[in-house]
Amino acid sequence: MDRNAIIAALPQPAPSRRAVACAGGHQRGALPALVLLVLVAACGRAPTDDILRGGVPANTNLHHSTGLPAESVRTVNRNDAGWRLIYRPHTAPAGAEQQAAHALCSLERKRVAQIVRLPLEAPYDDPGAAKIDVICA
């Protein structure tokens, strides 16, 4: 008999609970848990169902919608009065404020009523940036 046959013939000690758990001995509940996780995730509503005020779908790429170059736009958001845009005028084309205001108001199928330039609360955070509120009517 060779050495491997002798070792195989010896009685083997029973594995400890920890060894069984680490080796995956308690996986009976793993498949139902995975199936349950997939079903719960599939039952959630799609994130694109949300609509912003003014009827604009929430999945709209607002930065792109302004018509300004991507490096010019810092922030676009919808507020109670209309739209707020923070952008960098030195990287934007001439007439950027009017262009962005028209593009944002047209998302709501409205016209531009007013463009209000606002001071930045922390101008040193983004030097050269400008903030405007666009009011649509």
Image: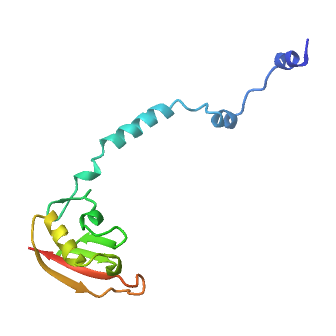
Q: Residue 117: x and y, percent?
A: 23, 85
Is 14 situated above or below 79? Answer: above
Q: In the rendered image, which quarter contains the N terminus?
A: top right
Which residue is nearer to you in this view: 135 or 5?
Answer: 135
In the rendered image, the vertical position of residue 46 relative to residue 113, given as above or below: above
Q: Quadrant of residue 73?
A: bottom left
The quadrant holding residue 13 is top right
Residue depicted at 85% across the width and 15% down the height: 5
Residue 111 location, x and y as percent?
Answer: 9, 71
* Residue 14 relative to residue 99: left or right: right
The residue lying toward the viewer, choosing from 113 and 68, is 68
Total marks in image: 0
Please say if 106 is above or below 80.
Answer: above
Please name the residue shown 31% across and 80% down the image.
89
Front residue (pair 117, 69): 69
**Could you say where residue 105 lies in the image, as x and y percent from the top left?**
15, 69
Corner quadrant of residue 39: top left
What scheme was used to colour the molecule?
Answer: rainbow
Task: Name the residue at 10% across, 64% down.
Answer: 109
Q: Dividing the image into 4 quarters, which one contains the C terminus? A: bottom left
In the image, residue 83 above or below residue 12: below
- The furthest residue to the top: 1
Q: Which sits in the foreground, 26 or 94?
A: 94
Would you say 125 lies left or right of 16 here? left
- Toward the front, the furthest residue is 94
Residue 133 percent across, percent down from the top left: 21, 79
